[in-house]
Amino acid sequence: MKRRSPLKVICFGSIVIILTAVSAFAGPDIQNGDFSSGLSSWTVEWGDVTDGGGYALFQEDTIHITSTLSQEFTIPVGALDLSFDVVMTAVSGGVSDPIAWPDAFTASLLDPVTYNPLVSNPGFPDFYYLDNTGSVETIAGISGNTVILDVSTLHGLDALLSFDLLASYDGMSTSVSLDNVNVSVIPAPGALLLGLIGAGAAGLWRRFRKSY
């Protein structure tokens, strides 16, 4: 029976240990943010939110004034931004009231226990507000249809991400497409260390083989 090289065993063991440590340190990130698995991992709290075929489709509900989709997750160590793509469409239809506010789509990042906002516009629980007149109120950045929120100060916090379509009697029928919900993360120190160890181990292994 061929015995394994001690050097190879040590290198392999070191990599396994680091991978385990990095995995244990990182919390669960956003799941199914591209909606490739329908609405799996997401919760439709109420209203009309369906699988649009690779995105989440929000529509006005005949019973509930609000259609809500949410997911609890842990903001990972090294997180930079929370981003998502949103497209709103509005056509004439429905009951009209001259004093009604426009239909609007909002995004909130909340403490899942207290429901207090982790980030917010001053005086509002949501960090993003878009109504069907095109008015936007947000502390996030916007690039085309993409909303980008800085979460670099929230590492390790449990969070509830909630998206809401708020309907009203504005004489418009509004729908929203949501896609590509994602948290961008810089490499954790453990991952960088793993890369260095891997490169070093490869070099040592080449030298070890040459010596025989």
Image (spheres, rainbow, N blue to C red):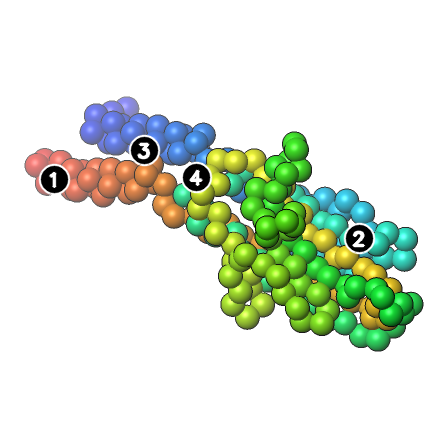
The amino acid on which the numbered mark 2 sits, given as a three-letter code, is: Thr
The amino acid on which the numbered mark 1 sits, given as a three-letter code, is: Arg
- Earlier residue among tags 1 and 2: 2
Q: Which mark is residue 47?
A: none
The answer to whether residue 31 is seen in the rendering is no
- Earlier residue among tags 4 and 1: 4
Q: Is residue 18 above or below residue 29?
A: above
Picture quarter with the C terminus: top left
Q: Determine the image quadrant of residue 97.
A: bottom right
Q: Toward the viewer: 125 or 51? A: 125
Instruction: Determine whether label 1 and label 3 are within 8 Å by CB.
Output: no
Within 10 Å of the Cα at label 2, are there few (<14), some (14-19), or many (20+) other Cα atoms? many
- Earlier residue among tags 3 and 2: 3
Left or right side of 136 for 14 = left
- Earlier residue among tags 1 and 3: 3
* Residue 162 x/y as whole percent: 67, 48
The residue pinned by badge 4 equals: 77
Picture quarter with the N terminus: top left
Which residue is located at x 68 percent, y 52 percent?
Answer: 163
Cα separation, mark 1 vs mark 3, equals 19 Å
Within 10 Å of the Cα at label 1, are there few (<14), some (14-19), or many (20+) other Cα atoms? few
Q: Determine the image quadrant of residue 177.
A: bottom right
Cα separation, mark 2 vs mark 4, equals 33 Å
The secondary element bearing badge 4 is classed as: loop
Q: Which mark is residue 207?
A: 1
The amino acid on which the numbered mark 3 sits, given as a three-letter code, is: Ile
The residue pinned by badge 2 equals: 66
The secondary element bearing badge 1 is classed as: helix
Which residue is located at x 48 percent, y 52 percent?
Answer: 150
Which residue is located at x 57 percent, y 42 percent?
Answer: 118
